[in-house]
Image (spheres, rainbow, N blue to C red):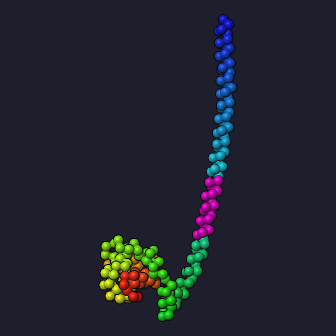
Amino acid sequence: MNKLLIAVMMMAGLTACSQEAKQETQETAQAVASEVKNEATSAADATASAAQEAADKVEAAASKAEEAAKPEEAAKPEEKAEAPATEAKPAESAKVDGKAVFEANCKACHGGLIPGAPAVGKKEDWAPRIKQGKDTLHKHALEGFNSMPAKGGNSSLSDDEVKAAVDYMANESGAKF
């Protein structure tokens, strides 16, 4: 009987320990859950704050870009006003870097990969075109010719930029423009 009494007491003790352990585990779990929730809230607040800062920076950059564009727009009417003067045109053309325009806009087709498009540096491709003269080459580039669209498909290029790129390509291919 003593053994049975001891076994019952041990089971009661284990049950009590289990109850205490269970309670401690629940309290710990609740504390961890609360901490995780607080950290998630802080992270969400930090992310929202960072997103707002980024949006503010983008807005500021856009405003600066608009302000930077305004002087250019103001300068364009002056350029147009000067255009009738014969001395103003060569000065503007001299400022344009034909190679840079070619690299950014023309190289995709005139780099030698597109059949039918004269490749820069290939004199045999350019010779018949150069014979037509500088004005004809400029006209074809500005207005489009055969499968080449006007201004090479980039309507944002100025006439002087297109002409400078044509002169660069032709000169690299045997012309002396």
The secondary structure that dominates the magenta segment is helix
Q: Position of residue 59 (x, y in %)?
A: 60, 67
Q: Is residue 60 magenta?
A: yes
Q: Is residue 53 magenta?
A: yes
In the image, residue 26 sits, relative to residue 57, either above or below, namely above
Q: Residue at x 41, y 74 (%)?
A: 107
Q: Position of residue 62 (x, y in %)?
A: 58, 69
The boundaries of the magenta stretch are 46-62
Q: Position of residue 112 (x, y in %)?
A: 35, 73
Q: Quadrant of residue 19?
A: top right
- Residue at the extreme bottom of the image, as rendered: 86
Residue 65 in sight in this render: yes
Q: Residue at x 62, y 59 (%)?
A: 52
Residue 166 in sight in this render: no
Give the mark count.
Answer: 0
User: Along the line of sight, which residue is nearer the eye, 43 or 176?
Assistant: 176
Q: Residue at x 62, y 68 (%)?
A: 60
- Residue at the extreme top of the image, as rendered: 1
Horizontal relation, residue 85 to residue 8: left or right: left
Position of the N terminus by quadrant: top right
Q: Position of residue 90 (x, y in %)?
A: 48, 90
In the image, residue 46 sits, relative to residue 152, either above or below, namely above
Q: Residue at x 41, y 79 (%)?
A: 151
Q: Quadrant of residue 23?
A: top right
Horizontal relation, residue 120 to residue 33: left or right: left
